[in-house]
Image (cartoon, rainbow, N blue to C red):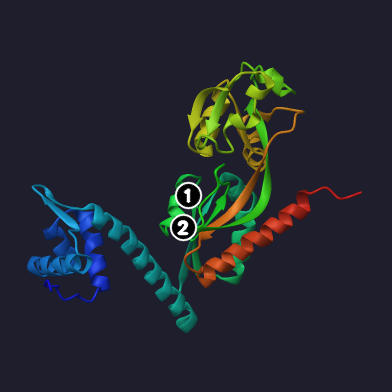
Amino acid sequence: MGYRPRRQALRLQHLHLLLTLAQTGSLRASAQILNVTQPALTKALRQLEDEFGTALVLRTPKGVRLAPAGELLAARAANVMRELARAREEVAWHTQHAEASVTVGVSPAVAILLAPGALARFGARWPQVKVRVIDSLYPRVLAQVRAGELDLALGPLPPEGVGRDLVVQPLFDSQNVIAARRSHVLAKCSRLDQLADAAWVLTGPTGGPGDPAHLHLEARGLGKPRIQLECESFSTLLALMPNLDVVGIMPLGFFDRYGPRTDLVQLPIEDELPRTTIHILSRADGPLTLPAQRLLDAFVQEASGLRLRTEPLSS
């Protein structure tokens, strides 16, 4: 029988070592950060590579970098360290009522329509919990949730949907409108057919709610929408759109809050415009922390109240 090296016990320090090497690209700098000698660090790295049976780090004249296997392990290690930090935080909350934190990503419609009320509701019940709110849209938001950078995300989904590694919960429907600056020659158009020659702004990702492709102008024989401007964020849109002859799609709640302040007007379009379903996203491989679950509950309650305020009464 061939010789098999004795397997070493995998420790959290080994994972921390790999993450530090990925961050610094240097054995020497990593040893200083971890407060160990460079020979001790090299020995620990060798133990980790023995454990997985492959090289995890490549040495170069400029330092070190992770091998492909090391990159795979580092991604998992980052999740492990984040989950451990959350576990410590949650245990401390239960045993000592210590401070906890929740990070949530929100789309513009959620930031305007739900976040103020949900965060006020949550803060009144959980004043010890720090909430970090991040502006986020897909496709980036999916990677942020999968990586554990966000506990929750609220916003639209890509047309192709998401994988089974994420838990998806529909929340509410957001009506979209078409807007332009007040002096735009098309500002009073009431039919989509009148926008055949319009210059459009695309806000957010291609295929997202801010993409005029959702209006299906080509099916009306109007040709493909001419995109003159692309904006990654609605804050940039608000800075540019009042000064340009472009038309664009935005959530009704967002327009009602900011449009009139920036000299934008809603086109009185009589054709039916698309609605965007807002969802809650979280990872499927583990339960939410107690504070994160309670924040989710606050958003659900706020969305229920929003539907009651906006849905027409049945006759």
Q: Nearer the viewer, residue 258 or 75?
A: 75
Q: Is residue 312 left or right of residue 139?
A: right
State if disc 1 and disc 2 touch (CB < 8 Å). Answer: yes
Q: Residue 51 sits in which quadrant? A: bottom left
Q: Nearer the viewer, residue 46 or 259?
A: 46
Q: Residue furthest right?
A: 315
SS at mark 1 in the image: helix
Q: Is residue 285 visible?
A: yes
Q: Position of residue 258 (x, y in %)?
A: 62, 38
Give me the C-alpha separation between circle 2 and circle 1: 8 Å
Q: Position of residue 101 (x, y in %)?
A: 46, 66
Q: Is residue 310 left or right of residue 298?
A: right
Q: Nearer the viewer, residue 206 or 265?
A: 206
Q: Number of callouts in the render? A: 2
Compared to 203, does 116 lie above or below? Answer: below
Q: Which residue is located at x 54 percent, y 36 percent?
A: 207
Q: Which residue is mark 2?
A: 150
SS at mark 2 in the image: loop
Q: Which residue is mark 1?
A: 141
Q: Which residue is located at x 58 percent, y 46 percent?
A: 156
Q: Which residue is located at x 62 percent, y 49 percent?
A: 278
Compared to 58, does 82 lie above or below? Answer: below
Q: Earlier in the sequence, mark 2 or mark 1?
A: 1
Q: Nearer the viewer, residue 97 or 232?
A: 232
